[in-house]
Amino acid sequence: MEAATRQSGEMDLLLAIAEINTLGRVLRRQDRLPYQGHHSTNEKI
């Protein structure tokens, strides 16, 4: 039982990390928009 709990905890951690990475990528892309006037501008979310 303890192993299962630890595994689901790891899963939550991985999901949280993935979410933070995705958020960071979105924020970086928005930061770049003003400087990079080509293809990025039609990638609006």
Image (cartoon, grey):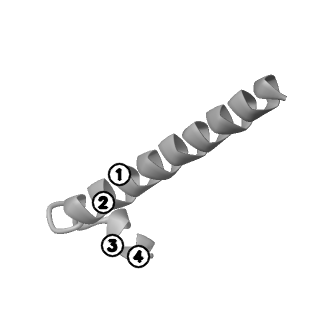
Q: Is residue 5 above or below residue 19?
A: above
Q: Nearer the viewer, residue 6 or 26?
A: 6
Quadrant (top left/top right/bottom left/bottom right) for the C terminus: bottom left
Give the amino acid at mark 4. Lys
Residue under label 3: 41
Secondary structure beneath dot 1 equals helix
Q: Amino acid at mark 3?
A: Thr
Query: Which mark is first along the chain, 2 or 4?
Result: 2
* Residue 29 drawn at (x, y percent): 32, 59
The residue singled out by tag 1 in the image is 24
Q: Secondary structure at mark 4?
A: loop
Q: Which label number is shown at residue 27?
A: 2
Q: Nearer the viewer, residue 25 or 32?
A: 25
The residue nearer to you, when weighing 7 against 24, is: 7
Q: Is residue 33 left or right of residue 39?
A: left
Q: Are marks 3 and 1 in contact (CB under 8 Å)?
A: no
Which mark lies nearer to you, 4 or 3?
4
For the residue carrying disc 2, how many other residues have a C-alpha within 10 Å: few (<14), some (14-19), or many (20+)? few
| Mark with earlier residue (3, 1) | 1
Q: Residue at x 85, y 29 (%)?
A: 1
Could you tell me how far apart the alpha carbons at marks 4 and 2 are, in whole angstroms? Answer: 12 Å
Question: Of tags 3 and 1, which is closer to the observer?
Answer: 1
x, y percent for residue 7 = 73, 30
Between discs 2 and 3, the one toward the N terminus: 2
Mark 2 touching mark 1, by CB under 8 A? yes
Residue located farthest toward the top when viewing the structure as drawn: 3
Q: Which residue is mark 4?
A: 44
Q: Is residue 43 above or below residue 21?
A: below
Amino acid type of the residue tagged 2 in the rendering: Leu
**Left/right of residue 14 with respect to residue 41 in the rendered view:** right
Q: CA distance from mark 2 to mark 1?
A: 5 Å
